[in-house]
Image: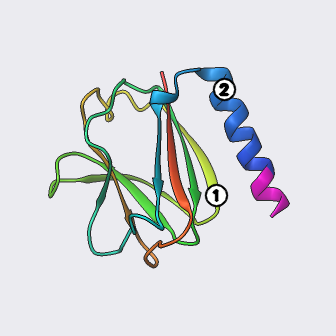
Amino acid sequence: MIRFLLVFALFWAHVAFATANTANVISLNTATTNVTTSSYVTLVSSLPIVPSQIVIVNATSSVIKLAYGASGSETDFVSVSGSSTIIIDQLSRHLTMGVRLAVEAISASASSGYVSVSLIP
């Protein structure tokens, strides 16, 4: 738990330092919208910026994967284990402005917690 809180604090410090625009933070409450292993759930239908980095917080107990692209044609680009945070660099060739970003569970459906993606310009 302490490790998670430390990572979470570092995440917010990184986001606050990198950008003050909260429009670039996308969150999904999985208690409201379950993330299942059977289909992708849209995080955002159109990215507002071209991110150079993204910070992903997976505060669920499930392994998830993020994908980009139109519904039915998603391309997976990262998986994130449960209760973890990762930072990904050099995404401009994949995540362009206007692209759809979606999430799907890998190990088991996520029905509690949240998934948060911060787009860093």
Name the image quarter holding residue 109: bottom left
Q: Position of residue 103 (x, y in %)?
A: 37, 57
Q: Which one is nearer the viewer's eye here, 35 or 105?
A: 35
Q: Nearer the viewer, mark 1 or mark 2?
A: 2
Q: Amino acid at mark 2?
A: Ala
Q: Mark 2: few, some, or many residues within 10 Å (few <14, many ≥20)? A: few
Q: Position of residue 63 (x, y in %)?
A: 51, 68
Q: Position of residue 92 (x, y in %)?
A: 37, 27
Q: Is residue 84 magenta?
A: no
Does dot 2 land on a helix, a strand or a loop? helix
The residue to which callout 1 is attached is 84
Q: Which one is nearer the viewer's eye here, 119 or 87?
A: 119
92 relative to 2 in the view: left or right: left
The residue to which callout 2 is attached is 16
Quadrant for the N terminus in the image = bottom right
For marks 1 and 2, the one nearer the N-term is: 2
Q: Amino acid at mark 1?
A: Ser
| Disc sitting over residue 75 in the figure | none
Residue at 16%, 54% (x, y): give it. 73
Give the magenta range: 1-5
Q: Residue furthest front?
A: 32
